[in-house]
Image (cartoon, helix red, strand yellow):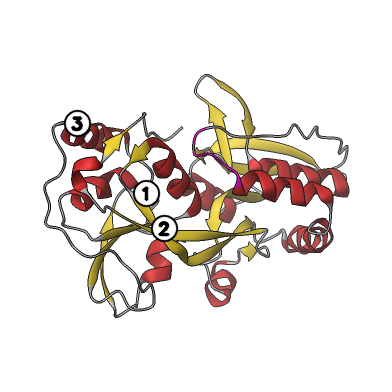
Amino acid sequence: MRPGRGRLGVGLLLAAALSLALGGCGRAHREPITDLQDLDGRRVGVCLGESTDYRLTGREDMELLRYDSVGGMLLPLCHGQLDAICLEYYSFRQVTALTTGIRPVEPAVSEDGLVFFFAPEEGEVCRQFNAFLADFRQTPAYADLMERVLAFDGVTYPGREVPQTGAGRVLRVSADIDCFPSVHQDAGGGPVRGFEVELLTHFANAMDYRLELIPSEYTDAELGLRYGRYDMMIGQISELYLDAAEAELVGVHVSDSFMVLPMYLMEIPDPDQVRILGELDDH
């Protein structure tokens, strides 16, 4: 369904932290980005196969370079091999919180809608979710969820406990736990939590479903969805990963977007001021 999933990359970020601690990056100065509609051939880094890659591919006003992780882009950005990097919302928040000297270019360069995938046999459940979502968007609970999403500080998940009350059919949900703060699990185990889990629990309660949240990762979830091990999958899935024709071809049902989040370009005005303030990791 998608070729890759770039995250923050512990080893590369530790290397970046060491390099940045040794006196800045020493790249040639270039004027700040002022026109997001015409980037004048700038070199922009994205994570391979992520929504930012899909969104910026095809733009002729930039040179797009693809990396395996956010951490893998920091050193090239610092040393002038990149003019900017493009980050989806949650990675943008984490980098903003845990570094200095790397700033966003305002306003957002684009946006991305997040969706759930449903197994080929679960078209009716997908339709139920879409109907639920249309109503849920008008509720104080959804407003509270989005307020907390948009106030995310890059470090701490500001969660709400939503107890399961459904007593009917069990939905087997593949939960990609490499998706803090949307879907994640503490290092020592415990329940799967996150913004998407909150939303899905509201849906399950409304429809009298029970949820079996199965910790997973994207490749396992994709295969399990196709071959009947899971009924649905969650975990920062972009609406860009499958268009309608692709979804029909593989038999996967794609929900409506349950939230739309910004994407940002980030650049370095002064390489000597860049510092890593904390451990950027995969949570």
Magenta stretch: includes residue 246? no
- 51 on left or right of 10: right
Q: Quadrant of residue 95?
A: top left
Badge 3 marks a residue whose secondary structure is helix
Badge 2 marks a residue whose secondary structure is loop
Of badges 3 and 2, the one in the foreground is: 3
Badge 1 marks a residue whose secondary structure is loop
Q: Are marks 2 and 1 in contact (CB under 8 Å)?
A: yes
**Can residue 225 be seen here?**
yes
* Residue that badge 1 annotates: 6
How far apart are the two marked residues, 3 and 2, measured between alpha carbons? 29 Å
Task: Please tell me which residue is depicted at 36% across the width and 41% down the height of the picture.
Answer: 8
In the depicted view, which residue is nearer to us: 66 or 86? 86
- 28 on left or right of 197: left
* Residue that badge 3 annotates: 21
How far apart are the two marked residues, 2 and 1, measured between alpha carbons? 7 Å
First in sequence, mark 3 or 2: give its number: 3
With respect to residue 244, does 177 lie above or below? above
Q: Are marks 3 and 1 in contact (CB under 8 Å)?
A: no
Task: Please tell me which residue is depicted at 87% across the width and 48% down the height of the picture.
Answer: 206
Residue 50's disc is: 2
- The count of marks equals 3
The kind of residue on which mark 2 rests is Glu
State the extent of the magenta-drawn residues as a range.
151-155
